[in-house]
Amino acid sequence: MSETTPEITIPAELLPADGRFGSGPSKVRPEAVAALAEIADDYLGTSHRQPTVKNVVGRLREGMSDFFGLPDDWEIVLGNGGTTMFWDCATFGLIRNRSQHLSFGEFSGKFASAVSSAPFLADPMVIESELGTKPEAVTTDGIDLYALTHNETTTGVSMEIKRPAGSDGLVAVDATSAAGGLRWDPAEVDCYYFAPQKAFASDGGLYIAACSPAAQDRIKELASGYRWCPPALNLKTALDNSTKNQTYNTPALATIHMAVSQVEWFNQNGGIDFAAGRSEESAQTIYSWADASALATPFVTKAEDRSNVVATIDFDDSISADVLSKVLRANGILDTEGYRKLGRNQVRIALFPAIDPSDIEALTKCIDFVLAELA
Ligand SMILES: *Cc1c(COP(=O)(O)O)cnc(C)c1O
């Protein structure tokens, strides 16, 4: 089905200051790009084994620990390859025998299927729920790792992170789109991992994993020699390098620096209250706008499941969300398209802390303008 995009010009005074609303890669703050440019001559293109780069890695690890309020015995582990690569690292280096996965969208489902093809692990227990809802973990004998997802980026559903009652398995949380924008309690988690191209407003290619002492013990146990592991996926190697402010192989230096800019910006402005507070404000704006609109409805029906970092908004059949997104794009408002595989008449809008809440307000005005023109 090909529809032509109607020529609609949104008045300049309605437009947001920054038109990036994608859920990943997402808006990088201009200040972070400028800070990178400023130190580029001494930093980019220099050895990652020398103090200049190691200091920046150290700032990343310290900044993250402060921001999340981690106990002293936790470690921030980093390596190349982003979250998808971390799933393979975890398959080799965090799951002892059998994991349980809450599957409620594309990303949470992907980790479960990566694990299910590992010949040295038992078939994972996968608990699914309908798209737009979330499943509950079930404490089960023999499960040594519970794989949760803080925010399912493809559906806009988030969950409060709780250790399954009475379980002694590790709790590993995919926080790729949540970390930085949603709150969590380290007492409920053993491994909180993410890539920094979403709420940390940097670029892709890196995984960052906050690991509790129990997670570090598991990493050491599984690396003790009884299971072969590809060297580049070895979490013990990553842990050892990280504690020396290094990575096993050459990291993406620009990605690291922009992530440092973001976490330090958070910490200088009030930490998680500031960062999560911006996402809360944006979420309040977009969902109350959708609730009040005759044509828009939040896709996630249960208000407590609606994400503060990624909003999914359905439209009435009289409007094509695809056409709406195309008109927005032609006006410089980017990446509002719904997640393709959901197949809904929907827009998806990131509410990450880097995105100014006033720009979310402006976006709702722009959408209203386009809807009126399309009617
Ligand atoms: C984006 C995303 C991923 C994939 O991250 P990559 O760095 O591209 O591998 C995984 N999980 C969630 C929840 C995501 O939002």
Image: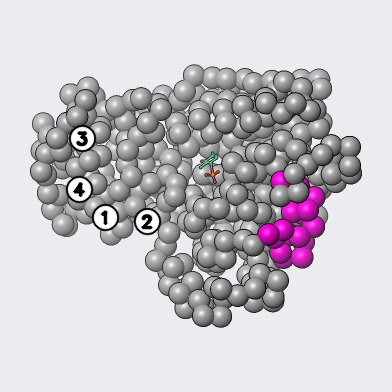
**Mark pair 1, 3: CA separation:** 19 Å
Kindly identify which residue carries mark 1. 16
Which mark is drawn over residue 356?
Answer: 2
Q: Amino acid at mark 2?
A: Asp
Residue sitting at 63 percent across and 28 percent down?
112
Q: CA distance from mark 3 to mark 2?
A: 25 Å
Distance, label 1 to label 4, CA atoms, is 14 Å
Q: Give the quadrant of the C terminus.
A: top left
Nearer to the camera, 134 or 69: 134
Q: Which residues are magenta?
A: 233-249
Tag 3's secondary structure?
helix
Residue drawn at (65%, 39%) of the image: 87
Q: Nearer the viewer, mark 4 or mark 2?
A: 4
In the displayed structure, 348 sits above or below 143; it is below
- Label 1: few (<14), some or many (≥20) within 10 Å? many
Q: Secondary structure at mark 4?
A: helix
**Numbered marks: total:** 4
Q: Is residue 307 visible?
A: yes
* 288 on left or right of 52: left
Contact between marks 1 and 2 (CB within 8 A): the answer is yes
Q: Circle 4 is placed at which residue position?
A: 330
Q: Nearer the viewer, mark 1 or mark 3?
A: 3
Q: Earlier in the sequence, mark 1 or mark 4?
A: 1
Up the image or down, 280 lies above or below 28; here it is above
Task: Give the residue drawn at x 43%, y 40%.
Answer: 310
Nearest to N terminus: mark 3 or mark 2: 3
Q: Amino acid at mark 1?
A: Pro
